Amino acid sequence: MTALLRDNRSAVLKPAGLRAGWLAGGVVAVLIALIAGLAFGSVSLPPAGVAVEMLNLVPGVHLHSGLSDREVAILTELRLPRVVLGLLVGGLLALAGAAYQGVFRNPLADPHLLGVAAGAGLGVTAVISLRAGATGDATADLPIGVPVAAFAGALLAVALTWLLGAAGGRDRSPATLILAGVAVSSFLAAGQTFLMQQHVDTLREVYSWLLGRLATAGWHDVLIVLPYAVVTAVIVLAQRRELDVLTVGDEEASGLGLHPQRSRYLLIVAASLGTAAAVSVSGLIGFVGIIVPHTMRLLAGPSYRSILPLSVLFGGAFLALADLLARTAGGQAEIPIGVVTAFFGAPFFIVVLRRSRAGAA
């Protein structure tokens, strides 16, 4: 532990900026995920033609892509909104996971495991259930107010997890915090089940949403989540230096001129807002907030000045590629994307848990 604190202090006193190579790698990963997500599916399109057609979206650029009008319509009206939504949601979940890990100084902190996603899900389920009778379709064209309900549920969940994790003492160990998150998630899941039982006509729609999905009929969901994504990214990325300072402890942070509690609350609110926005349009997609930040930490170093922006880029690319796998691996039947991320995330979580226990020992 002493060596860890010494390393953290060194990281604060000797800032490690974001390397251009890693930033370029993140951009390349996003471009690869974008082209792959647009090119492959029930109807395969030539990747080169897709890339040229994307360039045609730039004002003043007019190139011949070789795609037919039907293929261009599939590309721009069906696949592009879905892939962009995947990039946004994946980036938000990874960014929120990295922020929670820094705030709680806990390698297992994640929007899904802390109960934040379940709280946001309860808020969205309530809105879906209450409006289903008037629309006949509980999940199509979600209103702009849905992320507000998700945000309220997310903040409630993270507050309950934080308070329950401190019950019986002030020590919020990784195991204690995760157990608190599991308890809070179970409690909120019971609330979801009650609402679903009271509105059985929405059972199919809500269940499909709970498994996670990026299906979209257009740009409506993208436009809903985009403002929240921008606000979350601006706030969290602006606090990346503060997260580095928080890793050395509150006393050291105060000595360096930081207000630990104010920074911590601001980051929790921003991360919860991003999680709520992502959950409101995609459902409960777990493990992105653990897989991506930890991978970035192992590859690019412990500084949040690198982890946060890289988590946005690689998180978006990871979820877009996971969505591509969900669309294509099951043949005609689409696999819920939450199943795909859990397939990769559950073994990764076990590895992280073993590493954290070994470090604590």
Image: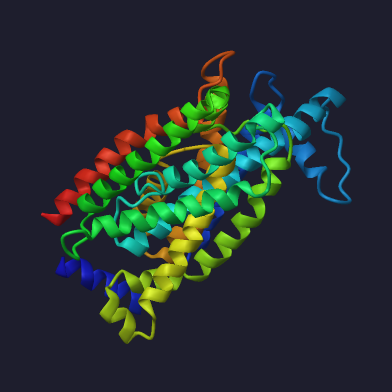
Q: Report the front residue among 92 and 244.
A: 92
Horizontal side of 125 relative to 56 (left or right) equals left
Query: Which residue is found at the position 50% from the left and 40% from the top?
Result: 318
Judge whether 196 appears above or below 261 on screen.
above
Q: How many marks?
A: 0
Q: Tell me which corner region of the image, top left, top right, bottom left or bottom right, holds residue 3.
A: bottom left
Q: Report the front residue among 188 and 271.
A: 188
**Residue 310 in view (yes/no):** no
**Residue 181 in view (yes/no):** yes
Q: Quadrant of the N terminus?
A: bottom left
Q: Tell me which corner region of the image, top left, top right, bottom left or bottom right, holds residue 230.
A: bottom right
Q: Position of residue 24 (x, y in %)?
A: 56, 54
Query: Which residue is found at the position 27% from the left and 73% from the top?
Result: 249
Spot the residue most to the top.
332
Q: How is the image coloured?
A: rainbow
Q: Report the front residue among 300 and 338.
A: 338
Spot the residue most to the left.
361
Judge whether 350 appears above or below 115 on screen.
above
Spot the residue most to the front.
198
Q: Position of residue 351 (x, y in %)?
A: 25, 41
Q: Position of residue 178 (x, y in %)?
A: 27, 48
Query: Which residue is found at the position 79% from the left and 25% from the top?
Result: 71
Q: Position of residue 266 (x, y in %)?
A: 46, 69
Horizontal side of 145 relative to 157 (left or right) equals right
Q: Quadrant of the C terminus?
A: bottom left
